[in-house]
Image (cartoon, rainbow, N blue to C red):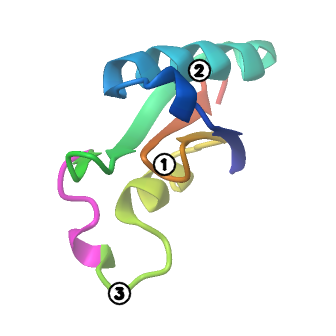
Amino acid sequence: MKTLYLNANELELGFDQSLKLANAAAEHVLAKQGGAMLLSFYDRDRNLESPHGVSECHVNCAIPGWQDYAENRGGALMVNFEKGRFVFCYRPLDF
């Protein structure tokens, strides 16, 4: 999975604003593949992941559950804000 790293500290973006920016970036990057669909995310500020509970089996693993979930479902792009503060994983719609 390719990763787009974004450092937006100075913009003081919250989760919702980061999600909107990630969606726009993913749509742009995956446009030639029909667009983007969000598969999973991680919010370090709230220690929240989606799908809920995917990291329960990954406690001692090198790859977090939300990333493994996306990779095993066609994930092609990870948008990573501020070194893991907010991370969003997408797959192309033409999968």
Q: Is residue 87 left or right of residue 83?
A: left
Q: Is residue 59 left or right of residue 46?
A: right
Q: Secondary structure at mark 3?
A: loop
Q: Secondary structure at mark 2?
A: strand
Above or below — where is 91 with respect to 18? below
Q: Residue at horizontal 58%, vertical 33%?
A: 91
Q: Nearer the viewer, mark 3 or mark 1?
A: 3
Q: Where's residue 56, x and y in %?
A: 21, 70
Q: Residue at horizontal 67%, vertical 42%?
A: 5
Q: Residues within 10 Å of mark 3 (few under 14, many from 20)?
A: few
For disc 1, the marked residue is 70
Disc nearer the start of the sequence (3/1): 3
* Amino acid bearing label 3: Asn
Q: Residue at horizontal 38%, vertical 41%?
A: 41
Q: Residue at horizontal 55%, vertical 52%?
A: 83
Assess whether mark 1 and mark 3 are in contact (beta carbons under 8 angstroms): no
Q: Where's residue 4, x and y in %?
A: 70, 39
Q: Where's residue 79, x and y in %?
A: 59, 37
The numbered dot on residue 36 is: 2
State the residue lying farthest toward the bottom: 60
State the residue lying farthest toward the front: 10
Q: Nearer the viewer, residue 57 or 85?
A: 85
Q: Residues within 10 Å of mark 2 (few under 14, many from 20)?
A: many
Q: Is residue 45 magenta?
A: no
The numbered dot on residue 60 is: 3
For the C terminus, the quadrant is top right
Above or below — where is 86 with respect to 58? above
Q: Hey, which quadrant is residue 65 in on the image? A: bottom left
Q: Which residues are magenta?
A: 51-57
C-alpha span from label 2 to label 1: 13 Å
Magenta span: chief secondary structure: loop
